[in-house]
């Protein structure tokens, strides 16, 4: 692998992945980051790389749905590997405006696959990053495995399921060397604050309500983003072509417990001026449509075949995450712009309290 095209590399996971490859991994080649810089794509997530990485990092402001732009990237930079992160990824947004999810997640993936097919003789890997949400919802027991049937509940998860099927079809039909990973919920630095953990951190610091859907009993499996990056790189290097690998943190936490934990950590790190615990800010709001009850990943295949293990405990990872948001107020101020504020008001402000 000499020239890796990373799509969506200015987003949360993509930016962490690029930083990991350039500063911690054994990769010595070039990274071409293609990102349209929509609301969650932030150039500040990769600030300093132009200088630090010199000729090993290139940024392309382009849309993965634009076939000409994708062709130009492949031809100009002799792309031999693709790591496809770019996606619309927020369930709540997909409920309000599903068209963007269909365009980016399905058409964008198709556009990349078509260009990869043109260069199949030099293509070493097409890795497609997906989500555990394609599997639907679990009850109180059981885990998602790589053979769990797809049962998506939202426009977001349905669009990702469709893109997964496209990637597999291009492997079977055109012999493109693909791998797919389906990952549980990520957290860590640079996450856009529409997602649960940064939203709760920043609302709590601002003494704003902490909106929790329903009764807060929905369960998610949490993974520190660096461990996700490590897993993706392991799959890209040593995963078997045509295979799917589930990535999980083996850390199931009900939403209400997570929010209470964040409140307690913040009270410890930044004592509230009014003396009242930040957990008092928790506000239960009407649940969103089709809210899956529980996600839990069985990542035995990844651990056994590629010898990967999550390194960060939740206690360590969540404290590092809170500290990062405390240490980066300028980044926070820049992302909390008009568009973000409008979204938070629309999604949470209009929901009735329970």
Image (spheres, rainbow, N blue to C red):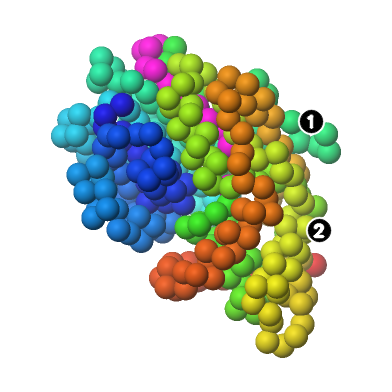
Residue visible at 61% across and 53% down in the picture: 317
Q: Decide if residue 259 is on the left or right side of residue 167.
A: right
Marks 1 and 2, Cα distance to the nearest angstrom? 22 Å
**x, y (%) of residue 91?**
58, 49
**x, y (%) of residue 209?**
68, 74
Q: Decide if residue 160 is on the left or right side of residue 39.
A: right
What range is drawn magenta here?
A: 173-186
Whether residue 67 is situated above or below residue 169 in the rendered picture = below
Closer to viewer: mark 1 or mark 2: 1
Residue 1, picture quadrant: top left
Asked if disc 1 and disc 2 are in contact, CB closer than 8 Å, the reply is no
Residue identified by numbered label 2? 215
Residue identified by numbered label 1? 142
Whether residue 169 is situated above or below residue 85 in the rendered picture = above
Q: Tell me if I can see residue 249 in this picture.
A: yes
Residue 175 shown in magenta: yes
**x, y (%) of residue 316?**
64, 54
- Find numbered disc 1 in the image and state the secondary structure of the residue it sits on: loop
């Amino acid at each position: 692998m000499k020239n890796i095209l990373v799509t969506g590399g200015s987003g949360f996971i993509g930016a962490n992945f690029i930083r990991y490859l350039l500063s911690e991994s054994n990769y010595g080649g070039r990274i071409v980051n293609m990102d349209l810089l929509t609301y969650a794509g932030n150039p500040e997530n990769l600030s300093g790389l132009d200088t630090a990485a010199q000729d090993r990092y290139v940024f392309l402001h382009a849309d993965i749905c634009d076939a000409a732009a994708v062709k130009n990237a492949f031809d100009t930079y002799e792309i031999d590997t693709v790591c496809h992160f770019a996606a619309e990824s927020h369930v709540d947004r997909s409920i309000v405006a599903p068209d963007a999810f269909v365009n980016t997640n399905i058409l964008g993936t198709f556009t990349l696959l078509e260009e990869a097919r043109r260069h199949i003789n030099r293509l070493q890997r097409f890795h497609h990053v997906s989500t555990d949400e394609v599997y639907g919802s679990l009850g109180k027991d059981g885990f998602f495995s790589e053979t769990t049937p797809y049962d998506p509940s939202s426009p977001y998860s349905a669009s990702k399921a469709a893109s997964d099927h496209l990637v597999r079809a291009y492997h079977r039909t055109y012999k493109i060397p693909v791998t797919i990973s389906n990952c549980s919920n990520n957290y860590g630095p640079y996450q856009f604050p529409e997602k649960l953990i940064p939203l709760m951190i920043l609302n709590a610091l601002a003494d704003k309500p902490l909106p929790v859907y329903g009764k807060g009993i929905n369960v998610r499996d949490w993974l520190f983003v660096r461990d996700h990056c490590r897993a993706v790189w392991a799959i890209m290097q040593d995963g078997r072509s045509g295979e799917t690998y589930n990535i999980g943190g083996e850390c199931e936490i009900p939403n209400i417990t997570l929010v209470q934990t964040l409140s307690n950590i913040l009270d410890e790190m930044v004592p509230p001026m009014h003396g009242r615990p930040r957990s008092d800010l928790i506000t239960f709001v009407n649940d969103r449509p089709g809210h899956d009850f529980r996600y839990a990943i069985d990542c035995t295949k990844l651990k056994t075949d590629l010898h990967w293990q999550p390194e960060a405990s939740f206690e360590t990872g969540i404290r590092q995450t809170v500290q990062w948001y405390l240490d980066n107020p300028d980044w926070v101020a820049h992302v909390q712009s008009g568009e973000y504020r409008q979204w938070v008001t629309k999604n949470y402000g209009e929901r009735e309290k329970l």
